Image: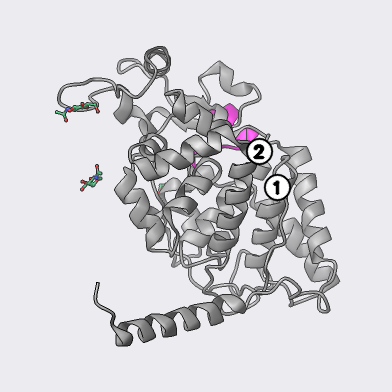
Amino acid sequence: MAFNPALLSSIFIVLLVFSTVTNALSLNYYDKSCPNVEQIVSNAVKKGKANDGTVPAALLRMHFHDCFIRGCDASVLLDSTRGNKAEKDGPPNISLHAFYVIDNAKKQVEASCPGVVSCADILALAARDAVVQSGGPNWAVPKGRKDGRTSRASESVQLPGPTFNISQLQQSFFQRGLSLNDLVALSGKLISTFLLLSKKKRKRVTSDASAGGHTLGFAHCSSFQNRIYNFNATRDVDPTLRPYFAASLRNTCPIKNRPRNAGATMDSSSTIFDNTYFKLILQGKSLFSSDQALVSIPRTKGLVTKFASSNQAFSDAFVMSMIKMSNLNGGQEIRKDCRVVN
Ligand SMILES: *[C@@H]1O[C@H](CO)[C@@H](O)[C@H](O)[C@H]1NC(C)=O
Ligand SMILES: *[C@@H]1O[C@H](CO)[C@@H](O)[C@H](O)[C@H]1NC(C)=O
Ligand SMILES: *[C@@H]1O[C@H](CO)[C@@H](O)[C@H](O)[C@H]1NC(C)=O
């Protein structure tokens, strides 16, 4: 490839601008203005988890949803108004719950240091605490995000979906400056938990008795139906699924007389933060096409194999990718109430 100084310098300028933006976040951002913020958020998450075991996974999913639409600007926390249907009420909204945990944290933070801490930062901290309190790795969260003023239901379709193939997943991540490494590291805990329900909600929709057990993720038949019926012109069932696993999914989701809201549970999103998700993919027991897609090209398959064999390698990669994703920001203000713009 020919050396092109003009191109090189423009790349350099882009990198410079980019690093200036990300440098706006810092580890000691609230050291003077709100020294207790981390403790307050951590306590709020602990309390939420004690009340409902699905809270940690829900907070992680909420942060991911926030960051992937308009950057991590707490747009996911805004309520719909008379004239506007907000992100949280868009199509994949069934996976979102536990907003009260963020409300509680914000209330206490405001009492301690009013008007200083953004809702986007509180959510980023809560997501980290959710991981830590589930036995996962700990890390220092850069802070200084601002809250956005726009939230649109129509934009929630920009989230990667359960039927995405590897090129669609890759594009969704690349558009946000995230790599294939980030895709694999974040998939199990952030994308694949998209139909996670609170205990209460789950009771209402579950027809599969086993969902009342200790697994947390619950997926409606519609989100993996493409793998168990009419997979393609020659095959009814996705051959990458273990036959007995596919049979049990078909049993749970019959074509005729399917119970309303039938679905399967995902073992991958248990309360314990570990690499089980990657092992299940390799065993042919992933639920979604978007999970199986990770082993459809050598580069990502190598990472799945690596993470399945080493919880440490997974944890390290997860932390790096979380920090990277959490740095996407686009807000303007410090909201007083996380549900409404100032
Ligand atoms: C969720 O999304 C559906 C479909 O867009 C919508 O009908 C519903 O009102 C939304 N909100 C809640 C809380 O379910
Ligand atoms: C992924 O899906 C898109 C849209 O359906 C399609 O255009 C593309 O060819 C698919 N890519 C692969 C690798 O299957
Ligand atoms: C159906 O899927 C199988 C397994 O992925 C593949 O080998 C086969 O070529 C596909 N058939 C068609 C018609 O796409």
Left or right position of 8 against 105? left
Which residue is situated farthest in the left direction here? 233
Does 288 lie within the magenta span?
no
In the image, the segment drawn in magenta is: 193-204
Q: Is residue 79 visible?
A: no
Q: Distance between the Cα atoms at labels 2 and 1?
A: 9 Å
Q: Marks 1 and 2: in contact by CB < 8 Å? A: yes
Quadrant of residue 84 within the rendered picture: bottom left
Q: Is residue 41 above or below residue 296?
A: below
Q: Tell me the SS state at disc 2.
A: loop
Q: Amino acid at mark 2?
A: Phe
The residue that mark 1 highlights is: 137
> Which residue is at a point 82% across and 52% down the rendered structure image?
43
Left or right position of 139 against 17? right
> Which residue is at a point 38% across and 17% down the rendered structure image?
246
Q: Which one is in front, 62 or 85?
A: 62
Left or right position of 68 against 145? left
Q: Where residue 270 sits: x, y (%)?
A: 63, 32
The residue that mark 2 highlights is: 273
Q: Amino acid at mark 1?
A: Pro
Q: Where residue 190 sits: x, y (%)?
A: 53, 46
Give the mark toward the camera: 2 or 1: 1
Q: Tell me the SS state at disc 1.
A: loop
